[in-house]
Amino acid sequence: MAAERLKDLSQPIDVPLLDATVAAFYGTGSKEEKELTGYDLNSRATADQILRYLQNNPDMWLQVVHILQQTKSLNTKFFALQVLEGVIKYRWNALPVEQRDGMKNYISEVIVQLSSNEASFRAERLYVNKLNIILVQILKHDWPARWQSFIPDLVAAAKTSETICENCMAILKLLSEEVFDFSRGEMTQQKIKELKQSLNSEFQLIHELCLYVLSASQRIELIRATLSTLHAFLSWIPLGYIFESTLVSNSGFSNDLAVSMSRLETLLKFFPVPSSRNLTLQCLTEVASLNFGDYYNVQYVKMYNIFMVQLQTILPPTTNIPEAYAHGSSEEQAFIQNLALFFTSFYKFHIRVLESSQENISALLMGLEYLINESYVDDTEVFKVCLDYWNSLILELFDSHHNMDNPAVTANMMGLQVPLLPGIVDGLCAQLLQRRRLYAGTMSKLRMLMICRMAKPEEVLIVEDENGNIVRETMKDNDVLVQYKIMRETLIYLSHLDHEDTEKQMLKKLSKQLSGEDWTWNNLNTLCWAIGSISGSMMEEQENRFLVMVIRDLLNLCEITKGKDNKAVIASNIMYVVGQYPRFLRAHWKFLKTVVNKLFEFMHETHPGVQDMACDTFLKIVQKCKRKFVIVQVGENEPFVSELLSALATTVADLEPHQIHSFYESVGHMIQAESDPHKRDEYLQRLMALPNQKWGEIIGQARQSVDFLKDQDVIRTVLNILQTNTSVASSLGTYFLSQISLIFLDMLNVYRMYSELISSSIAEGVPFASKTSYVKLLRSVKRETLKLIETFLDKAEDQPQIGKQFVPPMMDPVLGDYARNLPDARESEVLSLFATIINKYKAAMIDDVPRIFEAVFQCTLENECCNAACMTLSKLKVPQKSSDYPEHRLKFFSLLRAIATHCFPALIQLTSQQLKLVMDSIIWAFRHTERNIAETGLNLLLEMLRNFQASEFCNQFYRTYFLTIEQEIFAVLTDTFHKPGFKLHVLILQQLFCLVENGLLTEPLWDAATVPFQYPNNEMFVREYTIKLLTTSFPNMTAAEVTQLVNGLFESRNDLPTFKNHIRDFLVQSKEFSAQDNKDLYAEEAAVQREKERQRMLSIPGLIAPNEIQDEMLDS
């Protein structure tokens, strides 16, 4: 009964009852409130259901004023304002003028009423803040066009009381943030431009108000609110307001003053005051980050010098900043962080002004000294701020040094527009050298900072846990990896600028490790990570000399240091360093052999992580130096690979199976480098002797009794043998042919037998049969068999005879088995295997596609993994991800994409029912909420559209599917779960709109039987259809807005950037995407920027580590 009373909105809502319902939702309801409701409000779900109903009722907002006037509950007020906020966001422009004005005036009056009195303003602060937000939401619609007097009205209200003035500052701050900080993805580009222009044109009034408050008020809360508002404004106001004196008069406050003072001078006045210091510093940081040419350079220098004088009083230069931070209050810690932000912002934009005169240089160097000291603070955020600036400064110095031979580039970097005559070029070079000398001391200290604080690289697997124990790392820390990348880059630039100083500091710190003077795990770790990080940055001769000393000292340190944990740390660092310098190892065989033998020693060390890292480092070294292991070196009797194979059993004796697989992969790389086919086959035979011997024994026993293969230990052995083969196949490629030919047919027989065992176990109907350890083990063998075949075919060079040799025998044991099996027994790897085969052999597989299609398509779609593909697709709603077979999804669509790309003629031969099944499954894929499935579906659809457009079935295909595809793409485009697919959504829509314009479709897309009149062409029909579709789907958009959007899309269909911007604006107007992270809408532009950055890094020695460069390094 109570619920019905609340839901009846034809009369004023029962506010006490609503209070009780809201209280029940938040679990705060009193006994009296529960009795009042008459239903069980102990159930939060009941209250939630009622509140959701009210919130979704389009008439509920008409009750908001009544609720706010009657209720005393803050939660109820917030609920009412939430309802109102939804109306303002989505329906405001559709409301009658009198309703809009009434609500606007009411909200304004309540705000003034509550903020005019100190007591009510403090007591109702949360409520007032929410009302402020509502007011700003209204402003985004009505200002300036329908509320031109807003800024004058606000300033006039601020003059009546200091508490009202404080709240006016909060409203102005919110408005500035909405327009300048959070507008992207929230408003159309035209609306953003309009609001920015309005704020700029009316800023004089705001400026006068702020400056008067800061000059005349003694009230701390008001000063802090004004500084906070000022901070929001400073990023966009004209610089003249900051630096130039402005007369503030007739401000209307109780003590009428005339103050001639620039905003900057006013700010600096507040810096020494503890209560406003941090806010002032944030404002000064905002000023420091502005840059509009040289016009205000004098004022910036003056600001910096006054600031430095004040700072020395607040924080003397002799202060141990890391220690002060560690023991400081939260305010003091915030000050140190804000100080780092100020220095880095100022130097990024104005450091050259300080360099230009001798009297400013000492203040500059003192500021840099402060920043270096702050860089040692044990706080990630503070260090990130400092590191970001050091990286940009050193990059700038390096670029100038790097481009000395190109004066035009150098002049451009320095902002000079001058003719490059010989005398000017000499002057530029002299300036650059002078600048390097100026920062020489700072750069030397920075090198030590980078060495002392170097972050852990990804390759290092051995870490110190919170208890001080050395353990194997279990999870990668992405933040640390990003930090390492930036530090590594910075240290490489520093190394290029002065190799000698870099080498000297590293060797000096290493000698202190040897002497024990500076020995700690952390000190050795950061030093070795720093040494490894500069690989490739030195000239080869210098690098060789440096590495000889480093590796010698590290090996000595390993010998003289006692303790298992200590040795594990040193071993980890030796392995990391040597793994980073393949060029050095290739040039020094004895060192290479010593290092590899040391790695073999570490493979017997059972300390957590050491064996894994030894195997990883061995693989990395072999990949870059493999040729060295297959030739007879000076002083040797045989190639190292032969020596290794002779002692293979001993070397791998203490390794775990996964480590043995890595070792075998490494040796496979060595064998692959052997150019003599006979020797290569001999080495492969010796490498595989142990697994082949065991395989032969198992197959021999199986021939006598097939039950032998059912033993779990035997199954594990078979699995291990297959995994070893896969590892070698991945590194040997085509040259693995002799080995796989040896075991291939027996392997298929084992596959077939294990498949039958799995099916019979599941068919017996035992609950969860497919989840038992025995069935899981059998399936692991099947999957590894498929993985081995896929790896070999993928890595083998494009030789048709290999495909002819291996694909036909697999058709029944693999494809036939997949079709015959129960759904629970089907391996998704079959799908990826045949996708690989089609991608590899392309059109040669066209004749086999019908059989592949018949075997896997229908039965895969019968699996629940794809059952949603067959649903009706008329609704603009995306399916939820419910599936029993998630591993089949992506692999199935990858196979379908391979067929569409390389064997499209086979798809044309499908019946209309089969093609509909294909299209339904594609639509299901791109509607999926898992990103990789959706992306595969979109790519597949785009290829299908292009292929059908170029085929003779163009009219038939598009007549059937054009409208469905357009509707479905708009559905996912406007669904926030599918934001990452934005780029492909745009390309598909562009493809469709271009198609109807270019005349390729000669038949009408509309159904003459259902359309009352004939359209002149398909373009007119699609325009009208699209307008109707969007108008129906988004009733909050007017017909004029939708028509303008659709016309814009058609007009810009051949201009992708403009087409994309129209769609971005549509997503904002439709309110489908609002105040969320919209970076996915701009992902394509970001990808282009990343590629440019990679090309830049490739041009600088060492920036991309030798191990990361894809081109194989010559090691002949």
Image: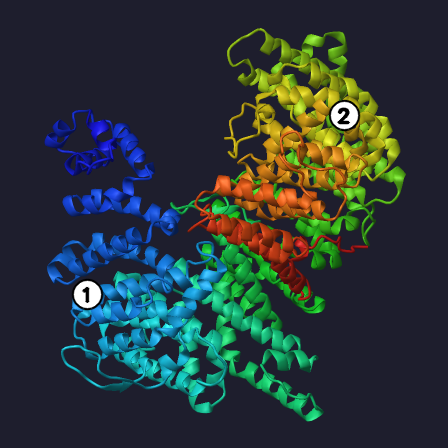
In this rendered view, identify the residue nearer to me: 915 or 860.
915
Label 2: which secondary element = loop
Q: Is residue 607 left or right of residue 201?
A: right
Across and down, in percent, residue 760 comes to 63, 9
Q: Residue furthest front?
A: 1013
What is the quadrant of the N terminus in the image? top left
Label 1: which secondary element = helix
What is the quadrant of the C terminus in the image? bottom right
Q: CA distance from mark 2 to mark 1?
A: 74 Å
Across and down, in percent, residue 192 comes to 45, 62
In this rendered view, identify the residue nearer to me: 1103 or 768.
768
**Residue 98 makes an appearance in the image:** yes
Q: Is residue 754 left or right of residue 245?
A: right
**Residue 619 makes an appearance in the image:** no
Could you tell me the amino acid type at mark 2?
Answer: Leu
Residue underneath mark 2? 910
